[in-house]
Amino acid sequence: MERGSRSNKKLEAITSSTLVVGVDIAKKMQWARFVDYRGIEIGKAVKFSNDKLGFETIVAEIERRCKENNAEKAIIGMEPTGHYWKALANYLTKKGFTVVLVNPYHTKKAKELDDNSQTKSDKKDALTIAKLVKDGRYYETYLPHDVYAELRVLTASRIGLSKRKSAIENTLTAVLDEYFPEFATVFKKPYKGKASMRILKTCPLPRDILSMGIDGVLAEVKQAVKKSVGRKKVTKLVEAAKETVGVDYGEAAATFRIQKLAEELELINQQMQQTEERMQAVLDKLEISKYLLSVKGIGVVSLAMCLGETGDPMRFEDARQMVRLAGYNLIENSSGGNKSGTSISKRGRKNLRCVLYQISLTMVATNPEMRQLYNYLKTRKENPLKKMQALVVISKKVLTLIFTLAKKKEYYTPTKMFGEVRRNQLQAA
C-alpha cells in the first residue's frame, strides 16, 4: 500500500462522530485533552494518575464526553517516549479503545507552529498530540500478546546483557592495561578462553603469577581446561609478568576487582546462553521460522531478535513498511539546485538496524547470492556504493526476504533470490 493511501485512511478514520484524545505521558501524573474532528477543544483538560485509579478515571471521562458529544468512538493518541505509555495503552486497548502513537519529533515541531514558542508543558503537549491525531499524523499501536511478545522481551533482555558484557570487558581491559598490559599479548582473546578466565579469577596480576610460578599457574589452569594445556603458554605468561611495566600500587584491591569482574562476566555469559536457548524454544512455536532459517546466513539468535523488533511479518502489507520501521527509507537532501545525495532516514528502530547489520555481515560472508549482490553494488560502473551503503541495501534485501518467505510460507530458493532485471545486471557485471 502506498504511503499516500495509508494517510488518507487515517484521515477517513476521523469523522464527525469521533472524539480525539491527546495524552501526555509522565511517570506519576498525566494530562488528557479532547478535540473534535475539526480540532476544536471540547471541555477542560483532565489530569490523572499513572495507576489503576487514574486509568479508571480517564476511561470514565472519555465515555462521558463521548456520550455528551454524540461521539460513536474515541481515538486516543500518545507519544511512545520511555516505557510509561505501554501500561496505559495496554489498558485502554483492552477496554476496546483505539490507541495510536504520535512521533515526539512531530509534537515538538507542531507545538512551535501553534504559538511560536519552545516552552514545554504537559498540558500543552496533550493538546498538540490530539491535533496531530486529528490530522492523521499518527501510526497504529502494536502491542503483541503472543509469541512475538515473548521474542520482544527476550530481545530486550539480550541487548541489555550484551551492553553489560561490553561494559565489564571494557572495565577489565582498563584495569589490566594499568596493572598488567602484557596479559593481552599472551591471550589474544582474554575474555573468551577458559584458561585466561581462570587466571583472571585466581591470579590476574604479575605478583600473583610470580608467587605461584609456572607449575602453580599450570595446575590452576588445568582445573578449568580438561585437555592438556601447553606449558609454553604459561611460561610466556610468567615471563611477561617478570618484564611487566604495569603499576605496583593497590595490587591487592586490583586483584579483588578483577576477580569480581571476571565472575560477573561469566554469570552474564551464562545468562546470555540461557536467553538464547529460550529464544530457540520460542522460535520453535512459530511455523514461519523453519522457512526463514532456511536462508543461509540467518541464525536462530539473529532471527529471534529481528522478529522481536519487527513483530509478526504478516501484519505488514508490503515489505517497504518493514523497511520504514527500521528507518532504512531513503531521503534526499536538496535545496534549490543543490543536491547532497540521499541517505537513510534513521527514523525507525535502532536495535533492528543493528541486528540487520550483523545479519548482513554474516550473509555477505556465507550466502553466495548476497555476496554476489554486495560485490556488484560496490564495483558497478554507475553509482558504485561504499561498503556501508552496500550493507544497507543488503539489510533491506534481508527484510524483503523475511517478508516474502513468511507471506508465501516457502523455503529459501537461491534461483528466486533476484528478479530478471537484477539477474541481468549481475550477469553483465
Image: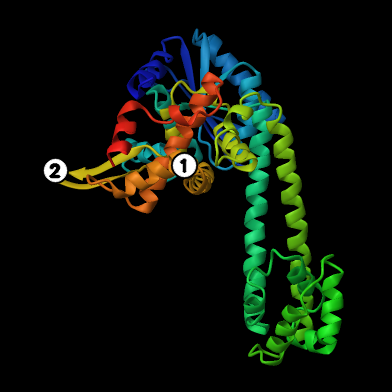
For label 1, count other residues whose C-alpha is less than 10 Å away and answer few (under 14), some (14-19) or many (20+): some
Regarding residue 347, the answer to whether it shows in the image is: no
Q: Which of 34 and 220 is in front in this view?
A: 220
Image-based side of 56 in relation to 131, left or right: right
The type of residue carrying mark 2 is Gly
Residue 49: image quadrant is top right
Q: Residue at 68% across / 40% down in the picture?
A: 154
Label 2 belongs to which residue? 336
Q: Position of residue 68 (x, y in %)?
A: 53, 10
Residue ranking furthest to the front: 427
Which dot marks residue 143? none
Q: Where is residue 274 in the image (x, y as percent from the top left)?
A: 76, 46
Secondary-structure class at tag 1: helix
For the residues labelled 2 and 1, the Cα–Cα distance comes to 43 Å
Q: Position of residue 423 (x, y in %)?
A: 34, 32
Quick one: quadrant of the N terminus? top left
Regarding residue 4, the answer to whether it shows in the image is: yes
Residue 253, placed above or below residue 127:
below
Question: Is label 2 or label 1 in front?
Answer: 1
Q: Residue at 52% across / 44% down in the picture?
A: 359
Which dot marks residue 368? 1
For label 2, count other residues whose C-alpha is less than 10 Å away and answer few (under 14), some (14-19) or many (20+): few
